[in-house]
Image (cartoon, grey):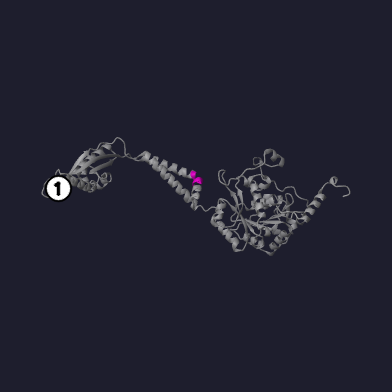
Amino acid sequence: MELQDYLVILRKRWLSILAIAVLSVSAAIAASFAATPMYQATTQLFVSVQGDATNSDLLQGANYSRQQVTTYTQLVTSPLVLNPVIEDLGLDERAETLAERVAAESPVNTSLINVTVTDENPAIAAALADAIAEEFKEVISDLEAPEDGSTSAVKISLVRDATAPLSPASPNLKLNIALGVLLGIGLGIGVAILRAILDTRVRSDADVARVTDTSVIGIIPNDDDAPQHPLIVQSSPHSQRSEAFRRLRTNLQFLDIADRPQSIVITSSLPGEGKSTTSINVAITLADAGTRVALIDADLRRPSVAKYMGLEGSVGLTTVLIGRASVEDVIQPWGNGFLHVLPAGQVPPNPSELLGSLAMANLLDKLTKQYDVVIVDTAPLLPVTDAAILAKLTGGALLVVGADKLHRSQLAESVGNLETVGARILGIVVNRQRRKQGEQYAYYDYTPTPATSADSGRTSRKKRKSPPTGRLPQVPESTSPAAVSGPTTLWPGDSLSETQLKDFRRQQAQNAPAQHQRPGS
């Protein structure tokens, strides 16, 4: 991870970091009020060496006392000093327990010893400090006494008596709050980074790039209202999701221009990632651009295309594959006549065998000759093998990835399944990707003004009360898939040849009202 990645994590997780810091400070305050106040009393001793009054003797004595001070501080908490104090004051504790509340230290390059005692009672703390100091003086005098019985050259003098403190030394509320803030922020940052490292969900196109080199050819923004309006291109044509599907259509037309796929399988790794709604909306956008499209619901386990589009789904693909009807009998026109839908039909007991049969291959070959694009919506890759079978029979697969739903390992497994059978992966579509307004690649809102919206018949999101109520105005019944003619055998953006231009003009002349025809025509 680079520095920019850490900054992104902090910006994304700042709320959780703040929450952890607040909890840490709250815990510090609670612990401070719950803790028993402890008081500290300090007494100070001075160590000197007696000798002759010459400068050399004084210097040697000062150096000796400073050297001995380090050793003396260790003796303050020894049982040799503390046991007599316990007996004199009648304390009910052992020397080891008392030693935990006694501290002795010597300032650097001095001959001073500070003895500090901590206790719940300030008066007891002061009395203990003074008693320890007096006992310490006697112990040092005995230890440093010469063998000939003369007076010891080391002298311990009491510099400052201990006094009962007025305020407790602990808990220190301000210090605890400061430590709580630092600990909380540090812990929050650590948790945020750990979550980012351990989070394997695919949330954006950047996560897809960590798994595979396959190009992301479409990013569909999240819309909490999308489940109620699956046909977003038809119900709200100027919404951000509709524009995203049109961008996906544009990107599809530039996939391998010299060898454009005529049949495309649209699948996902797991159920609920939006493969069916993606298939339907892509088919509608292609048909809106004048492309002849056949949409096949090949999800023979949980078919949903007919339900979303308001079509009859009792007969369809399975009916054709078992030879009980021809495709012309069961395929249904939808919308402006450029889109025909083949529902799944009855759910069979052997979906994989039907989809991998010769009848399915012949059906795909027939439809690719009659339509510009054949879109096949099929089952997810990981639960069943249907999508891998169809991806091999068609021109390639478009893999839909549901943001915040799929893990990177699952995406890698799906890509591996397609590569194992030698299927062509046309691209990846990241569906329901959440993006905040302040992010670098925020979506732009360029919807028509209210007046333009009224002219174009646009239905705003606020006015959407219910999903589409089924089929749009149909083409005449005599219109069969092969009868859709004219300069429509093109992908959006292709230029017309001279022959196609003549056919287009001739079709316009035939469809023109009689009163607008020239005399004698």
Residue sitting at the far top: 166
Q: Quadrant of residue 365?
A: bottom right
Residue sitting at the far right: 520
Kindly tell me whether residue 146 is visible in this rendering. yes
Q: Quadrant of residue 264?
A: bottom right
Magenta part of the protein: which range?
Answer: 10-14
Task: Tell me which amino acid carries mark 1.
Answer: Ala
Secondary structure, mark 1, is loop
Kindly tell me whether residue 479 is visible in this rendering. no
Q: Is residue 513 left or right of residue 110?
A: right
Number of marks in picture: 1
Q: What's the magenta bit mostly, secondary-structure-wise?
A: helix
Q: Is residue 460 above or below residue 276?
A: above
Residue visible at 38% across and 41% down? 176
Q: Does residue 11 show up magenta in the picture?
A: yes
The front one of 342 and 65 is 65
The percent coordinates of residue 67 (x first, y second) are 22, 48
Residue sitting at the far front: 55
The front one of 381 and 491 is 491
Read off the residue under disc 1: 145
The percent coordinates of residue 284 (x first, y second) are 69, 50
Residue sitting at the far bottom: 358
Q: Dot 1: within a 10 Å radius of its alpha carbon, few (fewer than 14), some, or many (20 or more) residues?
A: some
